[in-house]
Image (tube, helix red, strand yellow):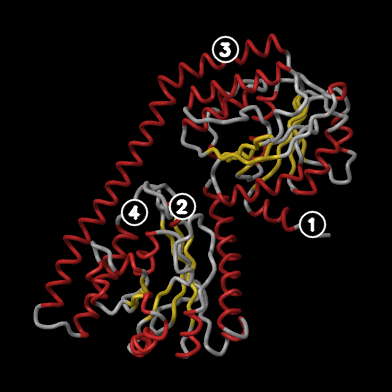
Amino acid sequence: MPEVLTDTQQALRRRGICVVIPTYNNAGTVVDVVTRAQVQCADVFVVLDGCTDGTEALLAALPEPPRMVVLPRNGGKGKALKAGFKAALAAGFAYAITLDADGQHFPEDIPLFLEANRAYPGELIVGERQGLRNAERSKGSRFANAFSNFWFFVQTLRPLKDTQTGYRLYPLKSLRGLSLLTSRYEAELELLVFSSWHGVGIKILPVNVYYPPREARVSHFRPGRDFLRITLLNTVLCILAVVYGLPLTIGRCIFRFLWSALAFAAFAVTTVVFVTPPVFWYLNIGGNSQRKKEEVHRFIYRMARFAVYGLRFPGVKYSLCNEPGEDFTRASILLCNHQSHLDILPVLALSPKLVLVTADWVWKNPFYGYVIRNVDYLHASEGVETLLPKIRSLLDSGYTIAMYPEGTRSPDGRTGRFHQGAFHIARDLGADILPVLLYGTGRVLPKHGRLLRRWPVRMEIGRRISPEALPQWGEGPREQASRLRKWYQFRLAEIADKIEQTRL
């Protein structure tokens, strides 16, 4: 029979997320932990780090045994994690959620890591254990965590409250220092430090924690020997921070700043020197005719295509999927989700017969506002009733009207509420609705961002919704807007799952 997966299990598999559980003689708890983890995730790897207590037989007897990686002798948590990560990568997974086998972590928190991964793809998610101050812990455990937190800040200049938590989500293809990983449990600190130095984002996720009574705990921590190992590791990391980690971090920041400044300068020079003045003189010498406006539209189209396909900023790969074979020969109302300042260029690069409905900041933009105001682009602040005759005339002339139904850019990449105006216009004018989905621009330059980031950008053109088919999306503009927004959310999530699993 085919495997039946829950929604969470399917979502984790689509995003290439598995669970890795290292264990050394936790026979009393590991079966419960693995069973509960399997409820959340169908892909669980258990690394048996030289277990001598019958753990392998217990797991093999489960109705659905996990994937087991058996190490012949106990090598420590660092070696177990390395073996688990290699097995996950070999199986095609992009991410691994790690949790301890002693019952301290709650597998029921795995969906929280899924949501965090969707919000912060490619980043290392650290499960910060809640209630540590009130938990019954030894003085050695408290000191070790504080000690680790302090040195992590010294080595990376980034504060973390719980650097010793084993509940994390790792982006496997972005891990650095894996070949140098120490063998014992201090390896988790090393992974954090190397990831920070190499620019992997680190996000905090509050998670639950359970500390059983002292007599029921299984601990392999050896205070004297392990504190010595941690001290030696931090000594080495501090030296590396000075000669390698911090220079690498500073260099990366300088590169991002220069790259972003160069991109902005190129944009400013292009619009101020090569776009706005020529358009101004062209439209004002000999009169501003409709033929001239059409020529300007073709000019804008060519400039947008050059920016999208020709410049190719480092790390920003653009792709277009046009499965329906849309050629824009028929006028329509184009709806595109809105994430970033960068959204305008891919839309303008679709067709020369395209007019944008713009927000105030575009209409009044000092670089290209003149062009926008003088080639029949539309000002959203005028309202639907005022715009309706203008849109009718443009549609009759064969122009596609591009709108952002969210009205404003999304600060976190999520698809916001769709306004109803576009659906009223499509109904009143009998126009097709053309859905266009845009992924990645909000990652390259988010709403409140100042520096560009390397990330793929993908545009996907959907199938037209004719006036006759529009009622299938709901009885009126309000329901139609709500249903189409849900479709955008679903399809964009599918695009994100595919790209973020294969890229990262």
Q: CA distance from mark 4 to mark 1?
A: 42 Å
Mark 4 packing: few (<14 Cα in 10 Å), some, or many (20+)?
A: few
Q: Which residue is mark 3?
A: 232
> Of the residues shown, which amino acid type is indicated by label 4?
Arg
Kindly indicate the quadrant of the structure image that contains residue 362. bottom left
Q: Give the mark, 4 or 1, whose residue is nearer the N terminus.
A: 1
Q: Quadrant of the N terminus?
A: bottom right
Relative depth, front residue between 139 and 468:
139
Report x, y in % for residue 73. Answer: 76, 20
Q: Which residue is mark 2?
A: 443
Q: Give the mark, 1 or 3, whose residue is nearer the N terminus.
A: 1
Q: CA distance from mark 2 to mark 4?
A: 16 Å
- Which numbered disc, 2 or 4, marks the residue closer to the eye? 2
Relative depth, front residue between 2 and 175:
175
> Of the residues shown, which amino acid type is indicated by label 1?
Glu
Q: CA distance from mark 3 to mark 2?
A: 39 Å
Kindly indicate the quadrant of the structure image that contains residue 291. bottom left
